[in-house]
Amino acid sequence: MKVELIRYTPDAFDLLLGTKTTRMRGKDPSEMTEEEKHDHWQYMLDTIESPFEFVDYIFNITDVSKNFTHQLVRTRTGAYQQETSRALDVSDNDIIAPDAFEENDEFARIFNKAVRDAQDSYRQLVAAGAQLQDARAVIPSNMSTAIKAKFNLRTLSDTAKTRLCARTQGEYQEVFRAMRAAVIAVHPWTEPLLQPHCAATGTCKFPRWGSKVIDEKPGFYDKILRDLSDGEEGHTVKTYQCPHYDERLDQTVVKRDVRIKFWSRAEIATANPVAKEGKSM
C-alpha cells in the first residue's frame, strides 16, 4: 500500500480564515497576527463546517485491493479515477492477502491455492480468445489496483470519524491513517479535524459493537485515566471488543434526558447571533 498526496489547495489556512471574514466582516487574514489567526481558527472549529469544503486534497493510492476501493468510492462526495480491469490485462496483478491469512499457515495455503487457480483460469480464458472484460470475472476481488481520489477537508473530516474507527477493516484504516499523515504533514492545523469519532465527539460511533465486554476480572481503578486514588478495590476491569472503548463514551442516559427536556418544551428556542470583530456568539 502506498499513499501520496499529489495536490492540495495552496494557502489553505488563510483561505479558510478568509471565508469567515466574508461571512462576519472581520479582519482580512493578511492583517491578522499569528495569534489572531490561531484564535479565529479555534473559533471556526466550533462553528459551521461549510468553509472546510473550500480546501481540496488529491491522493494517488496504489497497491491496494479492489475490495478496499469498493468501500472508498462509497464516499459519494469524493471524486475518483481508478485503474480499469475491463480494458487492461490484469493477469500479473497481485492478489492481496488479508493480514490474518499471512499469520496463519492453513489460511495462507488455502488462499494461495485459490489465487493460483483463479489466475491460471484467467490466463487460459484470455489465451482461448475470451474478452478481457469477461475473463476478469474469475479474478478475486482482492486483486491489487490503483486509484486517484479527491476529497475536500469537510469530507475528510467526516470520513475520518468512521474510517479511523477500529470497526473498519484493517486495510482501510491503514490507508486512511496514511492519508491523514500526509495531510497533517502539509497542513498541521487540520489535526483536530482528522480524528476517529470517539476522539472527535466523546461518544462511540458503534456502541453496540465497541462496548461489548469480552473479558472481565477484579482489579483496581486506573488512577491516570480515572483520576481516583490508588488501592480502591472492588472495581471490575473490563476488556471491550473495541480496545479504545471507555465507559465514559456511553451517553445513553444523557441523550435520553436531553431528548425528554427538548421535546417537553412548548416554545422553540432560537439563537440571536450578532457579529462582532469577525465572530458571533
Image (cartoon, rainbow, N blue to C red):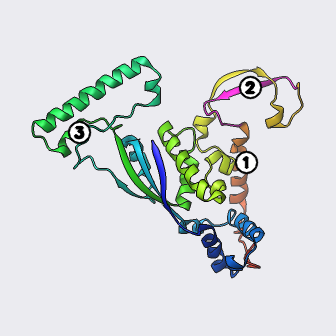
- Which amino acid type is marked by label 3? Ala
Disc 3 element = helix
- Where disc 2 sits, the SS reads strand
Instruction: Give the mark nearest the N terminus, 3 or 1.
Output: 3
Q: Kindly report the distance in space between the C-alpha atoms of the residues bearing marks 3 and 1.
A: 51 Å
Quadrant in the rendering for residue 111:
top left
140 relative to 61, above or below: above
State yes or no: residue 276 in magenta. no
- The numbered mark at residue 241 is none
The N terminus: image quadrant: top left
Q: Which residue is mark 1?
A: 254
Query: Which residue is located at x 70 percent, y 42 percent?
Result: 249
> Could you say whether the residue bearing mark 1 is in a helix, strand or loop?
helix
> At 33% across and 36% down in the image, what residue appears?
94
Q: Which residue is mark 2?
A: 237
**Image height of 109 relative to 158, above or below:** above
Q: CA distance from mark 2 to mark 1?
A: 24 Å
Please state which of the two labelled residues, at mark 3 or mark 1, is closer to the viewer: 3
Residue under the image location 65 percent in, 45 percent down: 198
Magenta: main secondary structure: loop
Residue 137 bears which disc, if any?
3
Q: Earlier in the sequence, mark 2 or mark 3?
A: 3
Q: Which residues are magenta?
A: 232-246
Residue neighbourhood size for the residue with mark 1, other residues' Cα within 10 Å, grouped as few (<14), some (14–19), many (≥20): few
